[in-house]
Image (tube, rainbow, N blue to C red):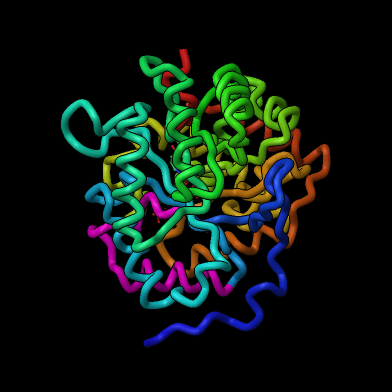
């Protein structure tokens, strides 16, 4: 069935400027890390993207290695851009990244100029795009001079292959250094993509949130649901087909008795607020406007719609925040913090 976007798609989604830039991002963005590879039902993936756009979610986040296999999510996006979204490209913000292992040998990983520039060329081919809106250095590389990695981002913008650049999972110190280099080169850093959730607060402890506010850089918080732990799906059991059954990025220890106790406590607070736990987790990340957009994943249209409902209630009382802290201080579920930022 051919797709025609909903005419009401801009009626309720709020959009915020991304730091001190002219680019507005929706409060909720969709990531294609899991559930958009060859291991997943393509019709569901397609339906999720269509529904997202219909709800005003204009921002779709990818990386070279999303799949499986690596590259498959970008190839999928290329297909739906052609079939469904060809006439909506200018209404969309599409991002991709390079920084993790993508191809064998010395040139397919980390932060060299060689890797970043050739990887983006491959990404553009897979997606059938002339440019991406945002290109990220996916992680800090302790062995490549930061000047080289940032120089590659600057070149990419000057080549017209990306409109903006960003950093992912760089800590506060490395972010300051990278941002200064980019500024000198004349290519400002638009955005930072860190992990952040009620259960994973490294960006508060590290000072990264304060740094981004000071530098006028926007933020897109990934895994606000702690990959599904901060939803009601694991409260009673581990459902078949869920990420926790795939033995990849949610591990057994994350679903310890202690953590399930925390999740149940948080679920009760969410219920009192008239929200699902997923909704409260997203609202929490977006509270007080410190984060520009929450970057969620979804394995069904129903999940996406539920998560979108978070926007109905973004305010928290001091008491609610205190109750949440009582259950959700780190909890050993630090699924993804800044890596290799020595
Ligand atoms: N920069 C980086 O290094 C990095 C790293 C990781 C992720 N990311 C980005 O962040 C995006 C989001 O990451 P994520 O998928 O881990 O985010 P998440 O939103 O924390 O987790 C998404 C998962 O939670 C479950 N879920 C979602 N909505 C739900 C709902 N309403 N009710 C019940 N369960 C629900 C689903 O699990 P099931 O699939 O089990 O149903 C879904 O796949 C990625 O796609 C990627 O773009 C970036």
Q: Residue at x 66, y 80 (%)?
A: 8
Nearest the viewer among 106 and 140 is 106
Residue 107 placement: quadrant: top left
Depth order, front residue of 122/74: 122
Residue at point 81%, 38% (across, down)? 319
Q: Looking at the figure, which quarter contains the N terminus?
A: bottom left
Q: Position of residue 241 (x, y in %)?
A: 30, 56
Residue lying farthest top?
A: 342
Compared across the picture, whether 199 is left or right of 69 comes to: right
| Residue 39 counted in the magenta span | yes
Tell me: 19 left or right of 49: right
Q: Where is residue 163 in the image (x, y as percent from the top left)?
A: 54, 49
Q: Is residue 146 visible?
A: yes
The residue shown at (63%, 49%) is 293
Residue stretch rendered in magenta on the structure: 31-54
Residue 244 seen = no
In the rendered view, does 246 fall on the left or right side of 158? left
Q: In this view, does 296 lie above or below 188?
A: below
Which quadrant of the figure has residue 53?
Answer: bottom right
Total tally of numbered discs in the picture: 0
Direction right: furthest residue: 318
């Amino acid at each position: 069935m051919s797709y025609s976007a909903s005419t009401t798609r801009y009626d309720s989604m709020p959009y915020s400027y991304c730091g001190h830039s002219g680019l507005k991002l929706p409060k909720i963005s969709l990531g294609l890390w899991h559930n958009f590879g060859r291991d997943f039902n393509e019709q569901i993936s397609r339906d999720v993207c269509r529904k997202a756009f219909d709800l005003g979610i204009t921002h779709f986040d990818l990386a070279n290695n999303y799949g499986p296999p690596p590259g498959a999510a970008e190839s999928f996006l290329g297909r739906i851009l052609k079939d469904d979204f060809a006439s909506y490209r200018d209404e969309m913000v599409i991002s991709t990244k390079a920084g993790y292992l993508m191809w064998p040998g010395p040139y397919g990983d980390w932060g060299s100029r060689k890797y970043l520039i050739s990887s983006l060329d491959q990404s553009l081919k897979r997606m059938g795009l002339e440019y991406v809106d945002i290109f990220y250095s996916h992680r800090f590389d302790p062995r490549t001079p930061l000047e080289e990695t940032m120089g590659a981002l600057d070149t990419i913008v000057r080549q017209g292959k990306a409109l903006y650049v960003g950093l992912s999972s760089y800590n506060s110190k490395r972010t300051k250094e990278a941002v200064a280099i980019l500024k000198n080169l004349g290519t400002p850093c638009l955005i930072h993509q860190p992990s952040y959730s009620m259960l994973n607060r490294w960006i508060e402890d590290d000072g990264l949130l304060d740094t981004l506010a000071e530098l006028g850089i926007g933020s897109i918080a990934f895994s606000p649901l702690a990959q599904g732990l901060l939803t009601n799906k694991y409260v009673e059991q581990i459902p078949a087909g869920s990420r926790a059954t795939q033995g990849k990025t949610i591990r057994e220890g994350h679903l310890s008795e202690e953590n399930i106790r925390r999740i149940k406590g948080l679920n009760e607070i969410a219920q009192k607020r008239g929200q699902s736990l997923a909704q409260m987790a997203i609202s929490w990340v977006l509270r007080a406007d410190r984060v520009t957009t929450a970057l969620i994943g979804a394995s069904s249209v129903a999940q996406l719609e539920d998560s979108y409902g978070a926007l109905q209630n973004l305010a928290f009382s001091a008491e609610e925040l205190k109750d949440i802290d009582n259950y959700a201080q780190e909890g050993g579920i630090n699924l993804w913090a800044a890596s290799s930022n020595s």
